[in-house]
Structure formats: structure tokens, C-alpha cells
Amino acid sequence: MRIARVLITRDQIARRVEELGHRIAADLLASGAGEPGVEPRVVLIPILTGSLVFAADLIRHMPVQMSIRPVTISSYPGTSTTSQGATIEGGLPTDLAGRHVLIVDDILDSGRTLGLLRRVIEAQRPASLRIAVLLNKHKPQGRDEHVEVEYSGFHIADEFVVGYGLDYDGLWRNLPDIGVLDGVGGKGEGPGV
């Protein structure tokens, strides 16, 4: 397999991630969260493994005191290009009451993963809950589940993409650009998303 074309370049990604980081930090600070010298009440929850690269770059532009608590959710096993249903596999914090929570994911596609995580976290009664995604995929027939996303890096067509953390069968995550993978049957997002 090869990359059919680059959809978003590394320079475009870097500029947009910096913008998102500054905007998210400003919103959190305006709500009284993440102030220096105060117990960290901001909890960043990156969804593994796809959001690792995005989350690492994003926090470099967020001068906010925070803790980072990754969670693992499975929905795209192996070479599957469509969601098989979201399942929380481990790492979900249980002490989020009264905290300002930011979920970070690489892509919003079916909505199942983020919908599940939002419901589970909302049940803990956080002070606020926001979601940031790098990619927001356009779904002409609609998503399986509607999910409110406060921060989106890029809106993309319904194509299978890899790179910058997104994968196909565990590969291509290290590609610095986001590209459309040639030879993948079906549309969707990569495993672990």
C-alpha cells in the first residue's frame, strides 16, 4: 500500500494545532481552570493510540496546569475500516467530579467512541467537559451517534486517512502528514479511533 495523496501537510497541521492549543487554553483559563499555584483541576484525556501525536503537540501550546490521564478504547480491530463498536479497555479515571475535562481524539467519524466516553465522564459530574478532535469527518448519511465537539482542527471528506497518529492495521502513525491511503477497500477511519 502507498499514500495516494497528501490531504493535510505537516505545516498546516502544526499551524492549526497551535491555534487550537491557544484557544483551548484561553477558554479553560477564562473558566477559572488551570491557574498556576492551584491544585490542577484540568484533566486531559487522550484516547489511545491514535491521539498520541496530536495530544503531545497540542499540550505544548497550552500553558495550563493539567494532569494527563490517557484512556484506551477499541473500535477498529486489525484491518477493519468501519467501527465494530466502542469498548473502553482500561485507564478511565474515576475521580473527575468537579474537574475540567478535555477529551482529545484524532478523528470524529461514527461518533460511537466519543459518544460513549462523553456519557461515562458526564456521569461523574465534571465541572466542564470539552472534546477536541484533529479531524472531523463529514458523514453524508449522518453519524451513528451525534456528538458535540467543541474544537475541531480540520473538516475532511469521508475518506480513509492515515498519518499523524492515525493508522491502518497499526501502521502509518508516524507519517508526519495526513494522507489518503491507496488500496484500502471501504471508507472509514483507522483502527483505534
Image (spheres, helix red, strand yellow):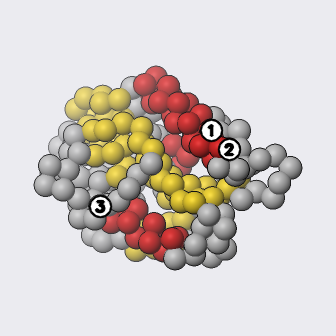
What is the distance, in whole Å, between disc 2 and disc 1 at their CAs?
5 Å
Query: Real-space Cα distance between discs 1 and 3?
Result: 26 Å
Mark 1 / mark 3, whichever is N-terminal = 1
Instruction: Indicate left or right for 123 with 35 as reference.
Output: left
Q: Which amino acid does label 3 sit on?
A: His
Could you tell me which secondary element the residue under label 2 belongs to?
Answer: helix
Disc 2 residue type (three-letter): Leu
The correct choice, above or below, for 80 with respect to 89 in the image is above
Please name the residue that numbered disc 3 is placed on: 146
Whether residue 127 is visible to the viewer of this picture, yes or no, is: yes
The residue that mark 2 highlights is 29
Viewer-closest of 103 and 150: 150
**In the structure shown, which secondary structural element does the residue marked by tag 3 occupy?**
loop
Q: In which quarter of the image is the C terminus?
A: bottom left
The answer to which image quadrant residue 114 occupies is: bottom left
| Image position, residue 41 (x, y; %) | 71, 59
Numbered label attached to residue 26: 1
Q: Residue furthest right?
A: 37
Q: Nearer the viewer, residue 174 or 109?
A: 109
| Residue 68 on image: x %, y % | 66, 56
Label 2 with label 1: CB-CB less than 8 Å: yes
Badge 2 crowding class, 10 Å Cα cut-off, few under 14, some 14 to 19, many 20 or more, is some
Residue plotted at (27% across, 70% down):
84
From the image, state whether disc 3 or disc 2 is nearer to you: 2
Q: Can residue 75 be seen in this view?
A: no
Identify which residue, 187 or 109, lies in the foreground. Answer: 109
N-terminal of the pair, mark 3 or mark 2, is: 2
